Image: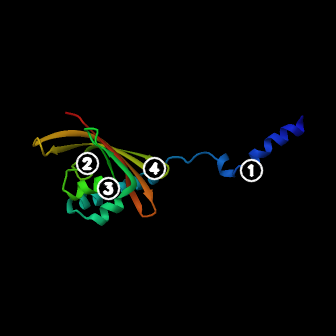
Amino acid sequence: MLRRSLLAALPLLALPVTSWAHPNQAPTGAEAQRMIDEVTSFRAKLAKAVETKDFATLRASYADNFSHTHGSGKFDNKDARLVSAMAGELLIEAAPASELVFRVFAGPTVILTGRSPILNVKEQKTYDFRWVCVYVTAASGWQLAVSQATRLS
């Protein structure tokens, strides 16, 4: 009986030791603040790239599998977002923001929520949007991976 139990456990011994370890813990304290500061700087760089239509910086700033869901439900991938930015459309990435809340996760990943007024050019009316952005790290630094905006008014 003991032999059968040991034989049954053999496949478990083949698992890498890392699978036995605890999952990564979210950074806290100074490490979390460093990540928040980095994402804040990255957001400023991205906003400036949108404003100046700096295509090279914009392209590097969005993850290859980036997606954005508009308040209308329209879905953009990275290429569509780059076209919108180059066309001068108003994007949450460059809009004034308030009510910012940063959440730091292992990965490193930072989720940021906020609120921004966005002008609807067709209606010539400004609407408030609540939005969420997910920032991840890549070999080149921070990138925007996912964003979504919801119109409040």
Secondary structure of the residue carrying tag 2 is loop
Task: Name the residue type under label 4.
Answer: Gly
Residue 115 locus on image (x, y percent): 25, 41
Residue 3 locus on image (x, y percent): 89, 40
Picture residue at 32% right of the left edge, 58% below the top:
41
Picture residue at 29% right of the left edge, 58% below the top:
46
Q: CA distance from mark 2 to mark 4?
A: 28 Å
Pair 2/3: label in front: 3
Pair 3/4: label in front: 3
65 relative to 3, above or below: below
Between 56 and 83, the one nearer to me in the picture = 83
Q: CA distance from mark 2 to mark 1?
A: 48 Å
Pair 2/4: label in front: 2
Numbered mark located on residue 79 in the image = 3
Task: Name the residue type under label 3.
Answer: Asp
Answer with mark 1 or mark 3, whichever residue precedes in sequence: 1
Q: CA distance from mark 4 to mark 1?
A: 37 Å
Task: Name the residue type under label 2.
Answer: Ile
Q: CA distance from mark 2 to mark 3?
A: 16 Å
Pair 1/3: label in front: 3
In the picture, the quarter occupied by the N terminus is top right
**Which residue does the numbered mark 4 point to in the structure image?**
29
Task: Name the residue type under label 1.
Answer: Ala
Pair 4/1: label in front: 1
Numbered mark located on residue 14 in the image = 1
Picture residue at 74% right of the left edge, 50% below the top:
14
**Which residue does the numbered mark 2 point to in the structure image?**
92
Secondary structure of the residue carrying tag 3 is helix
Q: Are marks 2 and 1 in contact (CB under 8 Å)?
A: no
